[in-house]
């Protein structure tokens, strides 16, 4: 499950009020200034628009229109008015910069408030997206705004738009690790979906994109455990096992007492059917962190898979001997695989204590028991697995 990071609120700057006073000028401008002083902003807006119809090069009128609209929280129209003022001249450049920053901060904070409400009422994600988009219009160089926009789009399940927003965040800030991680997760999910749909080419392409993004994050923070684990997954999905091997091996070499790195290396080795080496890494992880549930389970799986591989090899050897004309009495059965099944039991049983509702785990235990002729235990485990599957 995606864990959404905490988003900090920005301080909202006070509106930089115009200090031009009642100087000589057009009647509409004088009327507007009086209305502003009386906080009659709609009337002021009306007067300023009349003045600008007559003279669209009146910088002061554009600037005051921006202020009036900002007070009315019509932020995008206010931004347009401020930009028009700057196009005429830069008399109010400092004031415009301060006021635009205040509007951006207000929209950013309002967007966060809507986003947080979206967790209970998803319709609020739409409101957050609207506010964040407006904030990017006012402050188009803010990488953090594109990130939170992408976060809201992701929560709203608009993954294509989220991808675009996060890419923009990284374009503006290449070392933005949170944006890299979220964008990478989108590509990982897409890769898994395409693999499920039997679209191997599409799947590899998505995983390759994920690898590229996570590799960028890894260069920024090479000791980030989450990044390393997901980068391994991306490499494997993209059929770049050599890179995954180098990454996990180097991570362990750099921090041999990091249990998570040991576990990640073990998972990679297990996927390569390097059973003995993977078990070594899982046991090292358990020495560092005895309560590591994932290392416990995968150590049991490694022993189980090793036993299955040895049994298949033994059965193949028997078949070959029979094809040569040897009888059953002349063929010696290799039962050394059973030792691996016995080694798997304590790890799988420990995992079953923690994961009572895991049907697959109970099936695995049942098969191990069956291979060791532990009839009663096998029966109980199969019944447990069957009951769990029927309850879902």
Image (spheres, rainbow, N blue to C red):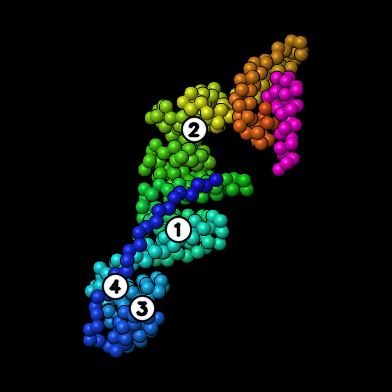
User: In this figure, which residue is indicated by the disc labeled 2?
Assistant: 264
Give yes or no for residue 372 being in the magenta stretch.
Answer: yes
Answer whether labels 2 and 4 touch (C-beta < 8 Å).
Answer: no
Can I make out residue 257 in this image?
A: yes
User: In this figure, which residue is indicated by the disc labeled 1?
Assistant: 112
Label 4 to label 3: alpha-carbon separation: 12 Å
Q: Which residues are magenta?
A: 366-392
* Residue 92 location, quadrant: bottom left
**Residue 15 placed where, x, y %?**
32, 69
Q: Horizontal placement of 45 versus 291: left or right?
A: left
User: In this figure, which residue is indicated by the disc labeled 3?
Assistant: 39
**Residue 241 placed where, x, y %?**
49, 35
Task: Indicate the secondary structure of the residue bearing disc 3.
Answer: loop
Q: Say whether disc 4 or disc 3 marks the residue closer to the N-terminus.
A: 4
User: In this figure, which residue is indicated by the disc labeled 4?
Assistant: 17
Q: Which is more foreground, mark 1 or mark 4?
A: 4
Q: Say whether disc 2 or disc 3 marks the residue closer to the N-terminus.
A: 3
Q: Which is more foreground, mark 4 or mark 3?
A: 3
Task: Indicate the secondary structure of the residue bearing disc 2.
Answer: helix
Instruction: Work out whether residue 204 or residue 98 is closer to the camera in this orientation and state it.
Output: 98
């Amino acid at each position: 499950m995606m864990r959404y990071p905490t988003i900090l609120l920005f301080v909202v700057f006070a509106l930089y009020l115009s200090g031009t006073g009642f100087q000589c000028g057009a009647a509409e401008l004088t009327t507007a200034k009086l209305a502003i002083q009386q906080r009659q902003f709609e009337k002021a807006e009306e007067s300023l628009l009349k003045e600008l119809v007559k003279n669209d090069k009146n910088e002061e009128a554009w600037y005051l229109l921006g202020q009036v609209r900002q007070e009315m929280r019509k932020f995008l129209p206010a931004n347009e008015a401020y930009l028009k003022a700057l196009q005429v001249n830069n008399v109010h450049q400092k004031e415009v910069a301060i006021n635009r920053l205040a509007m951006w901060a207000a929209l950013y904070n309002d967007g966060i408030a809507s986003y947080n409400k979206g967790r209970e009422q998803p319709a609020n994600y739409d409101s957050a997206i609207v506010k964040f988009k407006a904030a990017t219009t006012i402050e188009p160089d803010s990488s953090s705004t594109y990130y939170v926009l992408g976060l809201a789009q992701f929560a709203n399940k608009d993954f294509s738009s989220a991808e675009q927003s996060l890419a923009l965040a990284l374009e503006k800030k290449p070392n933005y690790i949170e944006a890299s991680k979220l964008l990478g997760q989108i590509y990982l999910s897409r890769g898994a979906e395409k693999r499920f749909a039997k679209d191997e080419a599409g799947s590899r392409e998505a995983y390759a994109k994920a690898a590229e993004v996570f590799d960028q994050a890894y260069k920024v923070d090479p000791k980030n455990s989450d990044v390393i684990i997901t980068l391994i997954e991306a490499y494997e999905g993209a059929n770049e096992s050599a890179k995954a091997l180098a990454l996990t091996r180097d991570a362990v070499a750099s921090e041999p007492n990091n249990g998570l790195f040991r576990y990640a290396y073990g998972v990679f080795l297990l996927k390569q059917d390097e059973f003995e080496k993977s078990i070594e890494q899982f046991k090292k992880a358990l020495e560092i962190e005895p309560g590591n549930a994932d290392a416990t389970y995968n150590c049991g799986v490694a022993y189980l898979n090793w036993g299955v591989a040895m049994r298949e090899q033994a059965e193949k050897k028997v078949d070959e001997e029979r094809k040569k004309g040897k009888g059953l009495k002349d063929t010696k059965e290799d039962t050394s695989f059973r030792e691996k099944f016995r080694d798997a039991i304590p790890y799988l049983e420990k995992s079953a204590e923690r994961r009572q509702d895991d049907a697959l785990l109970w099936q695995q235990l049942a098969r191990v028991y069956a291979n060791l002729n532990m009839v009663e235990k096998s029966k109980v485990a199969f019944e447990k697995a069957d009951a769990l599957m029927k309850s879902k």
